Image (cartoon, rainbow, N blue to C red):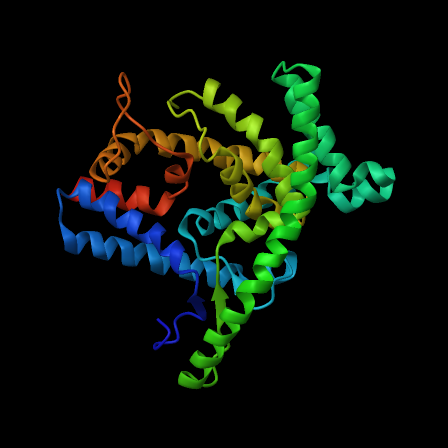
Amino acid sequence: MLITKTTKTVMVDFWSYNHFIFTGALVWYATNGNPWISIIASAVDFIITIKIADWTTPVVEDYFELEGVNFPTSNSAIWAPVAYALNKLWDVIPGINKIDINPKGVQEKFGFVGEPMFMGFIIGAAIGLLAGDSIDKVLIVAMSTSATMVLTPKMMQILMEGLLPFANAVKEILQKRFPGTDFVMGIDAALTVANESAITVGIIMVPITLLLAAVLPGNKLLPIADIAYQAMWLAAWPVAFGKGNIFRGILSTTIITCIVLWIATALAPVHTQLAIAGGFVLPDGMQFISTEDAGEHLIGFCLQWLAGFLA
C-alpha cells in the first residue's frame, strides 16, 4: 500500500499487529484451519483499518492535537464511522442537539469544580456510593479516580514524547525511500485517554457498562478484566466527533458498548477455543470465556461470520 500510494499510514506500533492476527485466528477456526483464507482475512482487516486511519487523521490532528499521527488499531478505528454517524444523528434530534457539556465549559462556568481533579473526585465518589461502599471505601475510590484524571494524561504525554522520536526516525527513512509522500505514523489508540473528555466519559462508562451487562437482552458477558481501559478507548471517537461534548460521548459510547457486548457474547465459543489452544485452563463450572476487547473487533467478527457461512 505504501508502494502503490494507497495509504500514508505507517503502523509503527508493532504490538498492535496482534489485532489483525486475532482476526486471522477467528477465521482459522471458522474455516477449520484454512491458512490462506485466514491470511486474506487478516489482510482485509488491515486494509480497512488503515483506510479508516487515513480518513480520521485530520480528526486526530485537530481534536487530539497529535500532529502526523493516527490510530490504525482495528478494535478502535472501526468505531470511528459509527461514532461519526451517531454524532450526525444527535445533530438532528431536537433537545439533544442543544446540549453541550465539555470540560472547558464546565471549568469556565464553575471554576475549580470543573477541574479534572475535582471532577474525578465527584465521579469516583458517585460510583462508590452507587456500589453501596462504606464511607472510607467511597473516599478511596474518589481519590483514586481523581488521581487518574490528573496523572493519566501526563503519563500518556510522557509516553508520547518517548514514542515520537522513533516515529520521526521511521518517517525520515521512508521519505528517503518514497520521496514526495507525507507519511503519518500509526500508533496505539490508548493515547486518546490523555484527553479530558475521553477519560471522563471512559470513567463514567465503567458503571454504565456493568449495568448494561446485567440488563442487556442477549448479552452473557460480564466484563471485568478489561472494562476500565476498554471503556476509555471506546469513548475516544464519540468525544472526538462531538468536539469534546461529554453528553454526546456518553450517548454514543453506550450504543457502541451494547454492540460490543453482543459481539463478545457471540464470539465466546471461538474465543474459548483460542484460549484453550493457548494453554488457558477453564475453571470448574465455566463453559465459555470472552472479553470486551474481542467484542470491539467488528471487522474480525464480520469476516469470521462470512468465512463460516461460506465454508
Picture quarter containing residue 294? Answer: top left
Which residue does the image show at 49% across and 45% down from the upper left? 82
Image position of 44 (left or right of 155)? left
Give coordinates of residue 265: x percent, y percent.
34, 29
Tell me which residue sits at (52%, 28%) in the image: 209
Tally of marks: 0
Picture layout, residue 284 above or below residue 231: above
Q: Which of 21 and 298 is in front in this view?
A: 21
Residue 226 in the image: x percent, y percent? 46, 35
For image coordinates 74% across by 35% down, the residue present is: 119
106 or 161, which lies in front?
161
Work out which quarter of the rendered image holds the C terminus and state it: top left
Asked where in the image residue 225 lies, by quadrant, the reply is top left
Residue 230, position as x, y percentages in the image:
49, 39
User: Which of the two residues, 191 or 234, is positioned nearer the viewer here?
Assistant: 191
33 in relation to 65, above or below: above
